[in-house]
Image (cartoon, grey):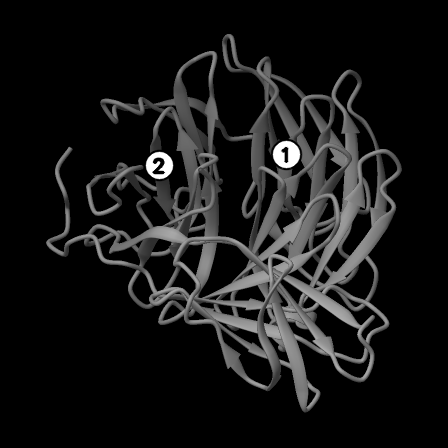
């Protein structure tokens, strides 16, 4: 593959912000790590404290702040503070190790990345442009890129989703086609070869409009969620011959925005004055739904999946995530302002091993929460104010910046 930009792969700049695990203790411990040096600085709200790292005392009776200059970059540590006032007051904060970070501008002419996908050892993205643009990114060297532009014919404007169907070994994107022509609008789904980049339309449907919706596949059928102003719909196509099977109306659930298949059911979210979530049984396309709690607005166009829940972020700037039970759609709200200190909009959520990651855009924070215990941390992206898409291959996270200089970033999260 040929690099489409002339800049070399440069380290991305991050800091790490970690709050205390909630306890009744009076101590309030925060840790900010400058990943370029690897040195964490601890700050707390009492005059003096003992500092423990991995259960070993490293500093006695010291005033805040304290920088641990013996920390090794990329390592993971657990810090504790114990006050002389009450030795039982212990606050723990985990510092996940970060190493091997990269960043590179996306190809010239590739603006507004709107979907990011890891598949078969490579990273792919589409740009929300007219006509749409597709790019390949090397998973090991994100400055190694290749780019293709779709036909400028009105059928290939503003691609929104990008998925893989492993049984076919191909990638698929749909186009919102929200421009002035053609009229009436035509739903177009395009198949892309991930190695040759040859692309062919597999669906041209002038009876369906998806707009700012979403899509996913269960291995037999392709489902597209529409962004309807009154009712959303789910359009079902058979992938063996791309024939339309059915259209299901989600009555009273407008502005469908995200759709994912978890191996058993489809889950969808929608925007509007009363944002909603739905669970769809694909055997008969029956569904149940629930509303997100106020004041939340505008669930983002993707969400993360864990065994028993899915995790939703919101483009409105409340700084909240919602953890939704797959079984009954009951909800738990997670306040990210405990970590970052500011209410932020979220533009992407992605599962990765034992963690869930959310892109909190207002402060350029990558928010991390343990799936099992809700322990929290955040990495701050210095100089990248509009992070919006996220994917993982299990070892690295890949993150894009939407505006300013569109950028792809990689950071190691696994062994």
Q: Which residue is mark 1?
A: 260
Assign a secondary structure to mark 2: strand
Find residue 123 and name its label. 2
Find residue 323 and name its label. none
- Mark 1 burial class by Cα count in 10 Å: few <14, some 14-19, many 20+: many
Q: Nearer the viewer, residue 415 or 107?
A: 415
Specify whether 16 is left or right of 306. left
- Which of the marked residues, 2 or 1, is nearer the chain's N terminus? 2
Q: Where does the C terminus fall, quadrant-wise?
A: top left
- Mark 2 burial class by Cα count in 10 Å: few <14, some 14-19, many 20+: many
Q: Position of residue 345 (x, y in %)?
A: 59, 66
The CA distance from mark 2 to mark 1 is 19 Å
Residue 8 location, quadrant: bottom left
Q: Position of residue 157 (x, y in %)?
A: 37, 44
| Looking at the image, residue 98 lies above or below residue 139 | below
Mark nearest the camera among 2 and 1 is 2
Q: Nearer the viewer, residue 221 or 8?
A: 8
Give the residue displayed 43% in from the left and 33% down from the top. Answer: 173
Residue 328 location, quadrant: top right
Give the residue displayed 76% in from the left and 63% down from the top. Answer: 273
Q: Nearer the viewer, residue 81 or 30?
A: 81
């Amino acid at each position: 593959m040929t690099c489409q930009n002339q800049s070399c792969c440069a380290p991305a700049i991050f800091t790490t912000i970690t709050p205390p695990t909630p306890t009744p203790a009076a101590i309030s411990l925060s840790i900010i790590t400058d990943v370029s040096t690897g040195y964490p600085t601890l700050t707390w709200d009492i005059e003096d404290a003992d500092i423990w790292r991995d259960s070993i005392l490293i500093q006695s009776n010291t005033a805040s702040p304290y920088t641990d200059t013996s920390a090794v970059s990329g390592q993971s540590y657990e810090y504790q503070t114990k006050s002389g006032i009450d030795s039982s007051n212990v606050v723990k904060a985990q510092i996940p190790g970060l190493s091997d970070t990269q960043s590179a501008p996306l190809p010239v002419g590739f603006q507004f990345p709107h979907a990011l996908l890891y598949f078969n050892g490579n990273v792919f993205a589409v740009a929300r442009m007219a006509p749409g643009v597709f790019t390949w990114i090397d998973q090991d060297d994100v400055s190694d890129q290749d780019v293709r532009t779709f036909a400028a014919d009105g059928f290939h404007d503003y691609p929104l989703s990008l998925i893989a169907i492993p049984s076919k070994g191909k990638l698929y994107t749909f186009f919102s086609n929200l421009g002035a022509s053609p009229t009436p609008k035509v739903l177009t789904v395009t198949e892309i070869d991930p190695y040759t980049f040859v692309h062919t339309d597999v669906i041209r449907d002038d009876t369906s409009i998806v707009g700012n919706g979403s899509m996913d596949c269960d291995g037999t059928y392709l489902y597209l969620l529409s962004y309807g102003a009154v009712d959303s719909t789910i359009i079902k196509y058979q992938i063996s011959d791309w024939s339309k099977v059915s259209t299901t109306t989600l009555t009273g659930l407008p502005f469908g925005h995200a759709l994912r298949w978890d191996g058993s059911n489809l889950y969808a979210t929608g925007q509007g004055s009363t944002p909603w979530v739905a669970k769809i049984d694909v055997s008969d396309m029956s569904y149940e739904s629930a509303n997100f709690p106020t004041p939340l607005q505008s669930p983002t166009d993707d969400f993360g999946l864990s065994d028993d829940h899915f995790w939703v972020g919101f483009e409105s700037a409340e700084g909240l995530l919602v953890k939704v039970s797959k079984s009954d759609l009951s909800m738990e709200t997670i306040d990210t302002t405990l970590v970052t200190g500011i209410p932020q909009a979220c533009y992407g959520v992605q599962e990765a091993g034992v963690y869930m990651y959310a892109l909190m855009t207002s402060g350029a924070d990558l928010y991390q929460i343990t799936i099992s215990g809700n322990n929290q941390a955040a990495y701050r992206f210095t100089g990248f104010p509009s992070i919006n898409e996220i994917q993982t291959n299990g070892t690295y996270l890949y993150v894009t910046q939407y505006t300013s200089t569109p950028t792809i970033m990689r950071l190691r999260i696994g062994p």
